[in-house]
Image (cartoon, rainbow, N blue to C red):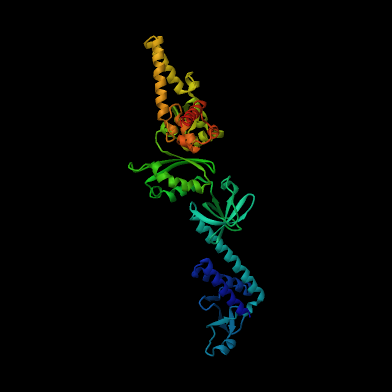
Amino acid sequence: MAADHSSEIVEAFTQIAKEKNIEKDELNLIIEEIFKMMIKKKYGEKENFDVIVNLDKAAIEIYQTKTVVEEVEDPITQISVDSAKKVEPDMEIGDDFIEVIDPATFGRRLIISARQTLNQRIRDIERKLLFDEFSNRVGEIIVGEIRQINRNEIFVSFERAELIMPKAQQIANERYKRGETVRALIKEVVDDPRGPRIVVSRSEPMFLMRLFENEVPEIYDGIIEIKAIARDPGERTKIAVYSNDKRIDAVGACVGMKGVRIQAIVKELNNEKIDIISWSSDPEILISRALSPAKPLRIEVDQNEKKALAVINDDEMSIAVGRFGQNINLASRLTGYQIETIKYSELSGTPESEEETVDEQETEATSMDAPITEATEAEESDKATLAESAEEEAVTEETLINDIKGVSKAAAEIFAEKGFVKLGDINDIEELRKAEGVSEKSLNKLISTHTKLQTKE
């Protein structure tokens, strides 16, 4: 029966080896080691024993070599000449006698011990194979099935492994469900006595980079480089890209025709906002672009201290800083500079809006160049009225908000994010008032223009 046990062990181990992709030579060595361990436990030594494993026949052959002697002093290494001649009549003193060991002689206890050792070696091999495989796949995107959801982590089944997505690696505003598929990045593989801990992430900047590589062939081919990424997972990301081919617009390639490429990525990230800017080696230009949608008037850079001061129009200050400082924080992380902002009015003591500054300068110029008479005032008033009337006549539902005089470009971009690109997109004035970061002047001008259009119609 013990022999059957040994055969069963070989068959079981052979099957497991196929499932775990264990090499045949490695399997042979393991089985030999197991049986040599059994030999040592039973006989105390193993030098004069040979173990031959035949995986094809699922058989184990054990041979013990003994020296033929007149009188036996050590029965493990010696055999009497009389006993040897009973098996092989031509045996002489000093010859080597090879005895076949029946595995049944090892006993049930040693067979059970061998099985336990085999199981442990299998687990060790499986852990090593798993660790090696996934260590080589760090940085790769996988698609797995959510198996279990705990408070602090999610377990994902992928191929023959169980992956872990800790809470810190999840997108905060996403809701995961058991049985759903999820796409994630293999972040790291940690060797653990209980088995490799394979950590995946959806919050890592590298995950976003891999998504861009999948959606934008120019990035995958190396024509466009992702120079830097700053990310608040699930909320907003800023990414700086650079084209190695002057004929290709890096930002346009990432956005895609009608935004199809960027929209695929935004959808994957649960509508995370993504600002794509063109990389520049000039810190002033890079910082100015990084503060988008705000348009800084001037950037003062201290390259030694890695600090920068951005002069911002008063009505764009809230846009430059962003909600809870998010925009300026992301810009700082993207550029590597600690960015501070200052209002234009605070810097020079000028009015809060650059537009107001220009108006005042024009008024001053008029008063200095020629005295304003009553006739002149009336003439200028008539001209202004005619210009305003002409402007109102030209306004239609197709008029872009960005083209309306008095509505700043920054305000137009904020309205566009809300879905208001042209006047015809406005159905409810109250929706305009909900837009954050828009100056009163721009808001009132848009409402006034929209109201006059409705009245004219």
Residue 254 lies, in percent from the top left, at 42, 44
**Res 240 → quadrant:** top left
Q: Residue at x 64, y 70 (%)?
A: 113
Q: Which residue is drawn at 54% across and 49% down?
A: 201
Say how many tags the image has: 0
Q: Nearer the viewer, residue 161 or 177?
A: 177
For residue 366, side relative to residue 142 (left or right): left
As drawn, the residue found furthest toward the left would be: 247
**Res 381 → quadrant:** top left
- In the displayed structure, 453 sits above or below 54; it is above
- In the displayed structure, 126 sits above or below 390; it is below
For residue 249, side relative to residue 164 (left or right): left
Q: Nearer the viewer, residue 218 or 195?
A: 218
**Res 78 → quadrant:** bottom right
For residue 345, side relative to residue 175 (left or right): left
- Can you say which quadrant of the picture contains the N terminus? bottom right
As drawn, the residue found furthest toward the front would be: 457
Residue 241 lies, in percent from the top left, at 41, 41
- In the displayed structure, 246 sits above or below 309; it is below
Residue 366 lies, in percent from the top left, at 39, 14
* Residue 32 seen in this snapshot: no
Residue 203 lies, in percent from the top left, at 54, 46
As drawn, the residue found furthest toward the right would be: 109
* Residue 367 seen in this snapshot: yes
Q: Nearer the viewer, residue 61 or 337?
A: 337
